[in-house]
Amino acid sequence: MPHRKTLLLLIACAATSLAQSSDPGLGTNPDAQGATSDVTPGSGPNGSEDFLNTGVRGEGWTAPFLSWDSLIKVDRPTFYGNVGSSCQQYDWAFQQSGDSHGIDPVFLAFIAMQESSCNADAGGPTPGLMQVACENYPDHQCTNDVAKNVDAGAAFLKQQLDATGRNAIKTIGNYNGWFTEGDETGLNNGRGLTEDYPCSADGQAHGQPQNLDYLQQTLNGWFVGLNPQGDENWIGQYQCKGSCDNDQLC
């Protein structure tokens, strides 16, 4: 029989493990490697984080293919009725831009939550709901005007879908500034994104992605109706805090 302290430790570890998982009841994506019906820190219905981040811990991100049309996701009423409630007031804009660019409006809501928590007044160099680069606006001028901001985000998303052959992983990564060797950005000595890049001198100088959990949080968080910035903040294996202090990777 285990020692009492050992038994208590085992119970505590089991409780922690159970707390850091959630079953959204959506099944799994058959095309996604490492997909699990439960969302854990490193996996979920749209694949494991190691699959989504292929190459990040090696020679550079390679963005494996996962069809946009195969993604496991919740619908808009479910999203708005739970973790995406702050987005519902902007549904008119998501519908308008989604219809214009041939994108299911719920995807725009998911990205708005990840990017700005659906805060139309969010600041920064790329302000507003979608936090999209200024070059994606018709006049190349950033604005937090809801209609223009959402349309710029939708236009960029559609551009990436077309450019990647509807590869969901590459599209979502590109939205956050992730890059592969084939993108020829010249960043990271011409390689794809690696886990040591965000906190390197080059990475910090270029303001490149400070969240290596972005794909996991988006595809296995918001897309399946969980909140990686709230109750499910354990989603992601890197737990990026936006700081490179204390030997953090991002």
Image: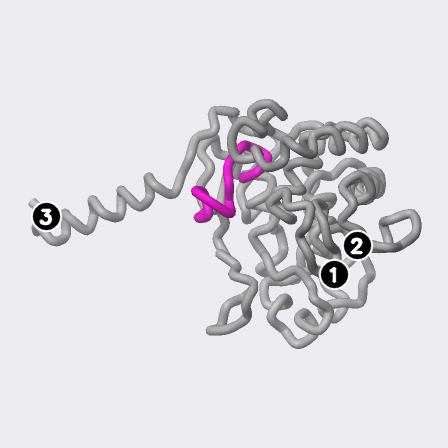
Q: For the magenta stretch, what is the residue range?
A: 221-234
Residue at label 2? 133
In the image, residue 70 above or below residue 196: above
On residue 210, which mark appears? Answer: none
Residue at label 3? 2
Residue depicted at 54% across the width and 66% down the height: 249
Instruction: Indicate the amino acid at tag 1.
Output: Pro
Q: Would you say residue 174 is visible in this rendering?
A: no
In primary-sequence order, the first of circles 1 and 3 is 3
Between residues 12 and 115, which one lies in front from this camera angle?
A: 115
**In this picture, residue 1 sits left or right of residue 196:** left
Quarter holding the C terminus?
A: bottom right
Q: Position of residue 108 (x, y in %)?
A: 71, 36
Q: CA distance from mark 2 to mark 1?
A: 8 Å
Query: Are circles 1 and 3 on residues that touch, CB within 8 Å?
Result: no
Q: CA distance from mark 3 to mark 2?
A: 57 Å
Q: Would you say residue 36 is visible in this rendering?
A: yes
Instruction: Indicate the amino acid at tag 3.
Output: Pro
Magenta span main SS: loop
Residue at label 1? 125
Q: Position of residue 49 (x, y in %)?
A: 54, 46
Between residues 37 and 97, which one lies in front from this camera angle?
A: 97
Magenta-drawn stretch contains 228: yes
**In this picture, residue 84 sits left or right of residue 150:** left
In primary-sequence order, the first of circles 3 and 2 is 3
Instruction: Indicate the amino acid at tag 2.
Output: Ala
